[in-house]
């Protein structure tokens, strides 16, 4: 990969779309060089319901990232989520047939293909086959069997599938927006690459990515992913509760949540008053933050309980020595860490992307975990295709600027 080549992660969420642009330096370190985001229109719980609106939202986010990076974007790594996501653990076994009985990369690919050969309905497609561990003859717990001697190779894997139509509609929207799709990646898996340390994966950790429309879950143990799941609740459900409870618009409810929202009432020391705008010409009124928190906390408690119920299905939740890491936009809600510690009884961390180069401040938030994680996925898998250097110069920059501001003000 040349010094000036870029990688692009596109987090397509229910309430926001974020594009994160990264570039590897001469030391192969990832630097953030561009960030763009746009309100997401056209999706519901991670599924496209309006192609045109989704295309426009993608274009706005990517064009903003292009302008910051100063380089055209042609290809993206896209995140996918939604309650259509399913996962299963599977096992594959092969015989080592070469003369010296040494496991090769080709053998590893063969055994993964064998593990992947599960019966799937016609309307589903495989997103990932994620190795957990290998066994060579009678020796288990092997992370990399290449070069080892054996006659029998076994692989335990975690297979993630998606509704084929939902995945294809994401691809169609990106292509209609003018970009190629390098790969589609499960969002909680991408987020884990950005926020988890190796020792957390080894010790055992759950990652809970609270997006706008869904909450995505992944469980890691002994260094590998063991379980994934999705629940159909997210930050927009909190916003809807506030809108209904305070008799105000969704837009105002979202602003109130971001500015004054507290997930755990125990943090409120003073009964601070806040102003709630009226609707339809009605006068604004004042309420206490305690009243607001009284609306937010029950919904957040429900999400935590549902997330824990899903993680318990992994049968290893009692071994999560590193506890749970929360990411996603709703993880920025004040008091979530304290509420989760009280209700789940586990160590809790709010996960921000682990990155040290480039525009670090621009992605220093849980809401960018998936976007940065998509870049990490491309780098870790070494399967990115480099973006070509830009030769379009000032004409390209000016055309993008013109289109960006026309869209903004029209």
Image (cartoon, rainbow, N blue to C red):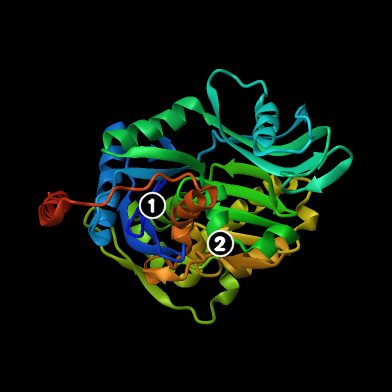
- Judge whether 14 appears above or below 36 on screen: above
- Residue 229 x %, y %: 62, 42
- In space, the residues marked 1 and 2 are separated at their CA atoms by 18 Å
- Residue 209 x %, y %: 54, 53
- Judge whether 315 appears above or below 89 on screen: below
Q: How many discs appear? A: 2
Instruction: Report the disc number at residue 85.
Output: none
The residue positioned 72% from the left and 47% from the top of the image is: 144
The residue positioned 25% from the left and 58% from the top of the image is: 282
- Residue 211 x %, y %: 48, 51
Check disc 2: other Cα within 10 Å, few if <14, some if 14-19, many if 20+.
many
The residue positioned 27% from the left and 38% from the top of the image is: 177
- Which residue does the numbered mark 1 point to in the structure image? 7
Instruction: State the residue lying farthest toward the front.
Output: 99
Tell me which corner region of the image, top left, top right, bottom left or bottom right, holds residue 278.
bottom left
- In the structure shown, which secondary structural element does the residue marked by tag 2 occupy? helix
- Judge whether 352 appears above or below 239 on screen: below
Tell me which corner region of the image, top left, top right, bottom left or bottom right, holds residue 3.
bottom left
- Which residue does the numbered mark 2 point to in the structure image? 195
Instruction: State the residue lying farthest toward the right.
Output: 138
The residue positioned 78% from the left and 50% from the top of the image is: 316
Instruction: State the residue lying farthest toward the bottom.
Output: 270
Instruction: State the residue lying farthest toward the top.
Output: 122
- The foreground one among 35 and 306 is 35
- Residue 285 x %, y %: 33, 67
* Residue 45 at least partly seen: no
Q: Is residue 50 left or right of residue 378?
A: left
Q: Earlier in the sequence, mark 1 or mark 2?
A: 1
- In the structure shown, which secondary structural element does the residue marked by tag 1 occupy? strand
Q: Is residue 97 left or right of residue 391?
A: right
């Amino acid at each position: 990969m040349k010094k000036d080549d870029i990688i692009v992660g596109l987090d397509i969420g229910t309430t926001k779309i974020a594009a994160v642009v990264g570039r590897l330096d001469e030391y192969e370190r990832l630097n953030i060089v561009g960030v763009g985001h746009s309100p997401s229109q056209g999706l519901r719980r991670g599924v496209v319901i309006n192609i045109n609106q989704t295309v426009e939202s993608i274009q706005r986010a990517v064009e903003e990232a292009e302008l910051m990076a100063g380089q055209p974007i042609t290809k993206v790594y896209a995140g996918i989520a939604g309650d259509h996501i399913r996962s299963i653990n599977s096992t594959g076994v092969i015989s080592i047939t070469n003369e010296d009985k040494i496991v090769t990369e080709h053998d590893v690919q063969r055994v993964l293909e064998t593990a992947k050969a599960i019966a799937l309905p016609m309307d589903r497609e495989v997103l990932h086959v994620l190795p957990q561990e290998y066994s060579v003859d009678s020796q288990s717990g092997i992370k990399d069997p290449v070069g080892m001697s054996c006659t029998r190779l076994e692989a335990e894997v975690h297979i993630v599938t998606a509704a084929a139509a939902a995945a294809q509609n994401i691809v169609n929207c990106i292509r209609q927006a003018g970009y190629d799709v390098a790969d589609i990646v499960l969002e909680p898996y991408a987020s884990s690459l950005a926020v988890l340390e190796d020792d957390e994966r080894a010790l055992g950790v759950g990652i809970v990515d609270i997006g706008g429309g869904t909450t995505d879950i992944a469980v890691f143990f002994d260094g590998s992913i063991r379980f994934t799941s999705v629940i159909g609740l997210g930050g927009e459900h909190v916003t809807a509760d506030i809108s209904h409870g305070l008799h105000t618009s969704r837009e105002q409810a979202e602003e109130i949540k971001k500015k004054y929202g507290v997930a755990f009432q125990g943090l409120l020391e003073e009964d601070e008053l806040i102003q709630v705008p009226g609707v339809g010409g009605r006068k604004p009124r004042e309420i206490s933050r305690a009243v607001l928190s009284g609306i937010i906390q029950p919904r957040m408690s429900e999400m935590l309980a549902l997330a824990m119920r899903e993680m318990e299905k992994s049968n290893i939740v009692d071994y999560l020595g590193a506890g749970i890491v929360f990411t996603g936009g709703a993880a920025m809600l004040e008091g979530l860490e304290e509420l989760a510690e009280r209700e789940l009884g586990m160590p809790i961390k709010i996960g921000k992307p682990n990155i040290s180069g480039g525009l670090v401040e621009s992605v220093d938030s849980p809401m960018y975990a998936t976007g940065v994680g998509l870049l990490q996925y491309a780098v870790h898998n070494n399967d990115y295709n480099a973006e070509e250097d830009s030769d379009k110069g000032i004409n390209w920059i000016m055309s993008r600027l013109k289109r960006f501001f026309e869209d903004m003000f029209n």
